[in-house]
Image (tube, rainbow, N blue to C red):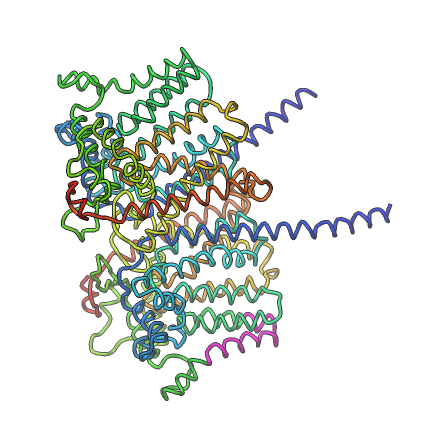
Amino acid sequence: VSDLRTHDLAADRTRRVSPLLAVRAVAGVLAVLAVCLQPPALAFSYDAGHYWGGATALVGGGSVFESGLLAVRGVLTSFLYLPAAGVTRLLGEAAAGPAVLVENALLMAAIGVLLLPALVGVWRPVTPVVIWVCAAAAVLLLRGFAPFPLTDLWAAGLLLGAVVALDGRGAVRLLAAGVLAGLAFHVRPAVLIPLAALVVAVLAARRWSGLWFVAGAALALLPQFALNRWRGTSWLPWPEATAALTQVQASYASFVVRYDTDTSGQVSDPRLFFCSPRMAHALDGTAPDSTGGLALAFLSHPLEALVLSAQKVGAALHWPLSTPYFVPAPGSDGLFALLVTVVAVVGAMGLVRATFRHGWRAMSLPQAAALIAWAGSVLTLATSATETRFALPLLLVGIAGCALLSAEGSGVRSSTAGRVWLAATTVTVAVVFGTGVWGLQHPVEGDVTVTRCATS
Amino acid sequence: VRDELMRTMTEERTDTAPIDSIARSLRRRVQLTAGIVVAVAVALQPPADVFLFDAADYWGGSRALLEGGDVAAVGLLELRGALTPLVYLPAALVASVVGQSAAADAVLAQNAILIGFIGAVLIPRLVAIWRPTTPRVVWVSALGAGLTLAGFAPLPLTDLWGVALLLAAVIAVDARWRGALLAGGLAAGVAINLRPAYLVPVAAICAVVLVGQRLRGLWLLVGIGLALAPQAVMNRIWGVTVIPWPERTVELSSMQALYASFVVRYDTYVVDGATSQLFFCDPALAADVHADGDYVRSSGELAGWMLSHLPHSLAFTGQKVAAALHWPLSTPYYAPGAAVNGVFAGLVTAIAVLGAVGLARATIRRGLRKATPAQVAAVVAWAGSLLTLLTSAPETRFALPLVIFGIAGCAVLFADGPHLPRSTRGRVWVAGGLVAVVAVYGLGAWGMAHPVMGAVNGPICADS
């Protein structure tokens, strides 16, 4: 009898596991196909050109440092598009666009059917509905990134990968989480705030074994450290000219709501700044040139800074259809911006509710880590010269939250708490969307200065 | 014992009623969700910058109806059906209220809703002719419609509306409610008015219904007659012809017949607003076309031409069908797209061919005699659409019915989940289907080996 039962159990287990695998496979293939059905990019410009240049220099020879602009970009950014660059080297220059498209489609499918469901798994068991919602939303919302060799999707994926890796016990997992978090920071230094908060949370929750996480992060930064020592330029584990970049960022961050790159071909200067004349007035002609100066500027004009920060977050979620770039398409842009805002806000509110439903003491480390990563990303948006693509972590967390809600139900019909939650979420969506629109009222084409902004 | 058995049986019978209604309400919810998801996904694309050629005519007609103006002249009604200006009336209404800058968005929204409706309602209802509709059928249909039809959404063309009406006519044959056949006839009549090419499949459906349902089938003809009445009335008012299609239809069809004798496919080439005609030629047949006027002018002559050029004309007709399924990503127009065009052509070909194989198997599985009238109507509508491709210089969008029936067939195939059939016979069908996909794809690529930009005639084509 016991034999029979174990046999049944085993059969039951395979039956329970294999449908999820089948769903992942089918959803993944469909996701790749759906992402690939768009025109590939004809040329890679600006940042995308540098990342691509680094990768092609790796396979084709030439100075990786020069073509990858490694003075300001992490050394591993040149490796992200190595597969696509390898294919292009084999098939010829014409294959560059399609190769990048396919590589990104695979990445998006992996995010949609593996990473995001795993993130939902931090709160509840993964079901086919979770996988389908994650995959469909990932395709629908991230599709625009696929033609370009950018690092934002990789960074957001690595950051959330670190969160997911914390779900479980053991030194290996902590080390892996640390490596992933370190890589995320390496690929996009803007991840610094969430990373620092994560380190604190892991150390607090796991005490001494939390050092494995720190060790992992350090390990991930080793290649950059080695490069810097080899060139003899710096003792720090980030690119040698990062400081210069930070200065520029701090200066713009003090009065610019959002920065876009206009690739419509209709403008002479592709730079498009949406700025805050109010804050520019308050700054009175001089923008800060360091992070400390930025903090001082924000603290000495708290009201203006608060409005500016809120506008930055709202505007960062106000994605045009052509995100990561800016090509105006009036009607569909509004629809897309609304969709992205709704997903990001509703999902976040859903996760917060799921976390605190049983009291905050019942919160697990990965749940806390996800919320910390989310809050850190919001803080980053509020304090930098934001671009739409910087909001990717918020959107990915939002998709996971929406998948959780669609699998679990929001309980809106059955409970008062559910109705209160719905009301609060609706108001938040309206406020965030409205703040975004408000922040985008003063576009300035070409380079912007405080004085130019103040008169816009 | 018998009493008890009877009692349980009656209990079971009453028990299934709520289960049926639960299943129905679940299906409705899935249909609503799928329809909205597909409509939103389709709407998330840049609207058109300008409306070109036919699209401009249809749109102009709708605007003229609302804002005054010579509808017949602006809508080019001597060539296009009298009902064509009505198709985009909702979008034109929105644009005239909100402002013409919203025109492209309004068209996109109207078409997105239609694609959601086709995917979540019409195709699943078509599938119901063969098997019960499940949530999976709805999702497969909606996804297929969204993926393949999204490119049509920004443009005010009549193809999507025509094919939706043709589907409605087929579905009406299966419907039980009174007046369904009359409604189906109306849909079929409007479909003919919007796209005269649907005359062939509609005539085939009529024949099936008249044979299968005798006198009751006349309702279908009544419906068609009613739907064509506006065209007849307008023709009388303009004093042009007595037959219920646009005045210059004959001219158009004789031009079609000429091109049909040597052109594999015709495309409108659109890149960054610059446009051109693009013909894919058959040089061997074109060499036989005499420039001095001795050429094919009617469907009858075309049939003679094809017969006199056997066996080459067989390959030529095969290429026509296959090339019409060889959709570039930018369908209904043509724009170069490295690699992605090939992938999209492969997807569309696979859907159309595998779906057709699936429907054929579902129809003849229990013997041809057991096929229902609606199944036969669907099959002849499909065959009629195929025949239309053969007798015209096809454009990719002419193959829309084949693609839609293909989606329905794929939904039938995948209704029970993606798995291989267990029987040998089933596996032979699968193998045959896959071979057919590869063959049709290859035939399409072969047929498109001789492109010519700009206007063509026999000699130009022969030199390509």
> Does residue B196 appear left or right of residue B46 in this picture?
right
State how many labels appear: 0
Q: Which quadrant is home to the C terminus of chain B?
A: bottom left
> Does residue A342 appear left or right of residue B457 in this picture?
right
Q: Which quadrant is home to the N terminus of chain B?
A: top right
Out of B238 and B403, give the one closest to the viewer: B238
Vertical relation: B65 (above or below) B147? below
> Does residue A122 appear left or right of residue B392 in this picture?
right
Q: Position of residue B159 (x, y in %)?
A: 39, 65
Vertical relation: A436 (above or below) B283? above
Does residue B210 belong to the magenta stretch?
A: yes
Which residue is at 40% across, 83% downward? B234
Q: Position of residue B192 (x, y in %)?
A: 43, 72
Vertical relation: A190 (above or below) B349? above
The quadrant where residue A110 appears: top left
Out of B159 and A171, give the one closest to the viewer: A171
The quadrant where residue A135 appears: top left
Which residue is at 30% across, 37% downward? A303
Does residue A105 belong to the magenta stretch?
A: no
In the rendered image, the residue lying farthest to the bottom is B239
Q: Overall secondary structure of the magenta stretch?
A: helix
Out of B2 and B314, give the one closest to the viewer: B2
Query: Visible in this render: residue B444?
Result: no
The region drawn magenta spans B208-229
Query: Visible in this render: residue A452?
Result: yes
